[in-house]
Amino acid sequence: MSKRPADDNASQESKRKRYSGSTDENVAPNIRIPGPIPAMFGLTPWLPSDIPSSLPCIPKILDPELEATVFLHPGLSDPLRGYERLEWLGDAYLELIASSLIYQTFTSTPVGRCSQLREILIRNKTLAQYFREYGLESKAQLPGDLKKDISRGRGSSSDKDIIKTQADMFEAYVAAAIISDPENGMANTASWLKSLWARTIKDQIVANDRKRKLATQPNSTEQGSTKDMASHSNLSAKEKLRIEIGVKGVLVRYEDMPRMGRDRDLGLPLYTVGAYLDGWGERNKLLGTGTALGKKEAAQKAAQQALENKKLLKPYVAKKAAFMEAMEATKASEEADTMS
């Protein structure tokens, strides 16, 4: 038996409610509810080769009505007709995509620093800058008190309203680009954001790749199982430095140094830590320094800097190798005496 028209209408109404999570009582009349939201897809880690030399091409919003909503300030109409709902969704997409990229790329970075990297990418100042770089402010439909300030938006305290509005519209654009193209919207938008964000944290991506490569390079001066341990990528820089030059009675210690100001992106205080060697004929020998938002990360950076300074470490590595050979020779001699 074929469905009656009333049944068809009921089915369509059921779908509309399921996608929107709304009922007739809380949906404004004549507001079209977009279709189902596409699922997430796999992202790959950042590499230096992912950093573009120019601004990547922004994905298109395939639905003209949805695109108009992106740039409509809620102060000019019913709030449900403005960008606020798209902005709410876009904010979630941005945080999820950024988190996925950071999680996969910065595999040995502490969670606190990962959160700081994500904040750099999704904060209002950054998103508003993207909004202006793509010239999207010319499409914005704003109330009079904001429209007169559209030429500003450069981050000063007097600009905070327009900065917030531009960031919100950028978030709405992200959501609209995704949901207007159920088949390719997520993949295209995430790929675009990956390239766009790579330009923002390019220094961190390059440094992380250098650290990753160094961690996987074998060191020909190490012996036996010690070589295997030091080249193991799961070891921290401090552990690798200890294995590289440390033995019983030789100490690598980490001490606080004078602070180096504040982080330029987050405005938080920076800590500086020095790695010092006591042993192999040295006392209080500075091997490297590191600066970061936390003391633990700064100490790891100090150890990493020391590891990268092969010329500085070479005599201590040689002394350790000679010491280990002498220990092995003594052990072999004692075993021979026991057998005789």
Image (cartoon, grey):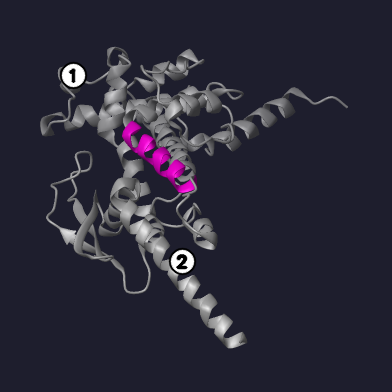
Comparing 80 with 128, the one in front is: 128
Q: Amino acid at mark 2?
A: Glu
Q: Which residue is mark 2?
A: 325
Depicted 329 relative to depicted 261: above or below? below
Give coordinates of residue 51: x percent, y percent.
40, 26
**If you read the primary sequence from the N terminus, does the residue marked by circle 2 or circle 1 appear first?**
1
For label 2, count other residues whose C-alpha is less than 10 Å away and answer few (under 14), some (14-19) or many (20+): few
Verify whether residue 241 appears in magenta: no
Q: Secondary structure at mark 1?
A: helix
User: How far across and how far down the image is residue 292, in percent?
Assistant: 25, 50
Is 105 displayed left or right of 15 in the figure? left
**Residue 36 picture quarter:** top right
**Against 318, is 183 above or below?**
above
The answer to whether residue 80 of the structure is visible from this angle is no
180, 83: nearer the viewer: 180
Give the residue drawn at x 55%, y 85%.
337
Which residues are drawn in magenta? 201-216
In the rendered structure, are the residues bearing label 2 and label 1 in contact, judged by CB atoms less than 8 Å apart? no
Question: For residue 267, what is the image quadrant?
Answer: top left
Q: Quadrant of the C terminus?
A: bottom right
Residue found at x 42% / y 61%: 321
Please, what is the dominant secondary structure of the magenta stretch? helix
Q: Nearer the viewer, mark 2 or mark 1?
A: 2
The residue nearer to you, when weighing 250 against 33, is: 250
* Residue 144: assigned label: 1
Judge whether residue 209 is colored magenta.
yes
Amino acid identity at mark 1? Gly
Give the residue at x 34% y 36%.
121
Q: Position of residue 144 (x, y in %)?
A: 18, 19
